[in-house]
Amino acid sequence: MLTIAAEDVTKTFREGREIVEVLKGASLHLEAGEVVALEGPSGSGKTTFLSILGCLLGATSGSVAIAGEAIDATKPAKLQGVRKRHIGFVFQQFNLFPALTALENVEYALNLKGVTGGDAERQAKDLMQRVGLGDREKFLPRDLSGGQKQRVAIARALVASPSVILADEPTANLDASVAGQILDLFSELARSEKRSLLIVTHDPKVRRVTDRVVKIEDGRIAA
């Protein structure tokens, strides 16, 4: 089953009187359980493409479907709904709330998906166990290592069982040993639970856990 089906995606932005074309017909397909790295130089359009696949931005033209649901860029509520049902994000800077414990950070993500109260706490505890942090539930982010913060971020991305996990430079702030552990965890969770994992990266070590590498150059997926 295709969890990502993007065809001829374009994206333009207006800067003053100029029209800047960032994506110029990018296409990408991902299967359930597939782990793919998206590589490209700065300015190639990879972050914009990731934002469109994650329903944070609408495409100017082309088509995108996530888990079989077509995205209508003219309807923000539709984008939000698809993002809520099908997509989990992992960011380079972790994006944890500093005043919340590790467990509360995961619970908050569940609250945003409509899961509250005891159900949210139980699911958050289960996710913390799955990423190997059952003994760090009450720690604040400042008391966690970089690798532990990223594990919390992964747990948060897994709430509500998304079809697709999108990761933006997830190993950039980690040393080589910890980055390897995070990549192993990523790939294990994706394959065992049949989730697609798309990793935007400059890190060649990511290739070790991927099924394939896709390159984007000047707004196009390179052949």
Image (cartoon, rainbow, N blue to C red):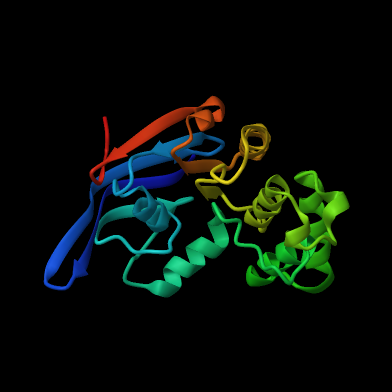
Classify residue 176 as left or right of residue 79.
right
Closest to the observer: 103 or 204? 204
Instruction: Give the position of the C terminus as an image quadrant.
Output: top left
Name the residue rendered at 23%, 44% in the picture.
218
Name the residue rendered at 38%, 34% in the picture.
214
Residue 162 on image: x %, y %? 59, 53
Closest to the observer: 120 or 104? 104
Number of residue marks: 0
Classify residue 72 as left or right of residue 218.
right
Classify residue 136 as left or right of residue 74.
right
Name the residue rendered at 84%, 54% in the picture.
136
Residue 151 on image: x %, y %? 70, 48
Closest to the observer: 62 or 20? 20
Residue 68 on image: x %, y %? 45, 51
Snapshot quadrant of residue 181: top right
Is residue 92 placed above or below 27 in the rendered structure?
Answer: below
Closest to the observer: 44 or 116? 44
Name the residue rendered at 54%, 52% in the picture.
92
Residue 142 on image: x %, y %? 74, 61
**Farthest residue in the left direction?**
17
Snapshot quadrant of residue 95: bottom right
